[in-house]
Amino acid sequence: MQIIKVLATDSTNTALRKLYRENPDRENCCFAADFQKKGKGQRGSNWQAKAYQNLTFSVLMNNLNLSLENRFKLSMITAVSIIETLKEYDIPELSVKWPNDILSGNHKIAGILIENVLSGPQIKASVIGIGLNVNQEVFRLGLKAASLASKTGKNFSLDKLLNKLSAQLEQKIGEQVHLDFKKIEEGYYKNLFQYQKGSEFLLPDGFKKQGVIDSVSAEGKLKVIFPEGIQSFDIKEIKLLY
């Protein structure tokens, strides 16, 4: 996979989407920046990382031709691919917290933002943005964040990690994106934080309630079992407290 590196950009997702618009036939590639000025998270949130200490990059997967109703496959495959790669570096207690956070223990070490290019009812291409805390040691007070270095006491080569993660992601998506959803979700649930365990949730009305994660739909909605029954929630409609 071709890797394009720049010193700084507003957002690697935005930059890669621009490259795709200029050439829709572009092969799969990776766009990485040493410093991301306006990193994007889910639904307008920000991703902040210190320059030259972390990875901020986006991967273009072209010619996917995936049905829009199965769009959460991409998030599942991406999360599990990152976790499997980081396990090779002995990062402890890895899991994915719905919808897009990678945790080590109770600390966030990575975030995922997927932006799809549609052609009718299908996803033609996808730009997958990843922010990974690597060598940064200090984080804003009150932020439940950590890095690979703070979890292991080691420093990591950003270039080697970037090469490994981007290649692994391209391979896994290519192999799995058209598999049956059931096969994809099996691996996802094995790594899903608090799956089928009693947890406290913050609901849209501001109240807190105890529930149990039941499943995640192909569209990415979280299904939670409450005493009165199962309810489904979209991204940003519910928050798992931990």
Image (spheres, helix red, strand yellow):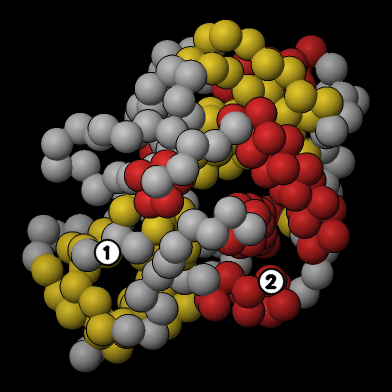
Q: Which residue is mark 1?
A: 240
Classify 10 Å Cα crowding around label 1: few (below 14), some (14-19), many (20 and above).
some
Which kind of residue does numbered mark 1 sit on?
Leu
Residue depicted at 51% across the width and 71% down the height: 191
Which kind of residue does numbered mark 2 sit on?
Ile
| Residue 128 percent location from the top left of the image | 63, 39
| Residue 90 percent location from the top left of the image | 54, 59
Residue depicted at 30% across the width and 60% down the height: 106
For the residue pair 4 and 216, the one nearer the viewer reads as 4
Residue 62 versus residue 241 in the image, above or below: above
Q: Quadrant of residue 141?
A: top left
Residue 73 versus residue 64 in the image, above or below: below
Tell me: 48 left or right of 143. Answer: right
**Marks 1 and 2: in contact by CB < 8 Å?**
no
For the residue pair 180 and 171, the one nearer the viewer reads as 171
- Looking at the rendered structure, the secondary structure element under dot 2 is helix
- Quarter of the image with the C terminus is bottom left
- Quarter of the image with the N terminus is top right
Classify 10 Å Cα crowding around label 2: few (below 14), some (14-19), many (20 and above).
some
Task: Compute the Cα span from label 2 to label 1.
Answer: 23 Å
Tell me: 218 left or right of 242. Answer: right
| Residue 47 percent location from the top left of the image | 39, 31
* Disc with the residue nearer the chain's start (2 vs 1): 2
Residue 5 appearing in the image: yes
In the image as oriented, which residue stretches furthest toward the left?
207
Which disc number belongs to residue 37?
none
Q: Which residue is mark 2?
A: 184
- Looking at the rendered structure, the secondary structure element under dot 1 is strand
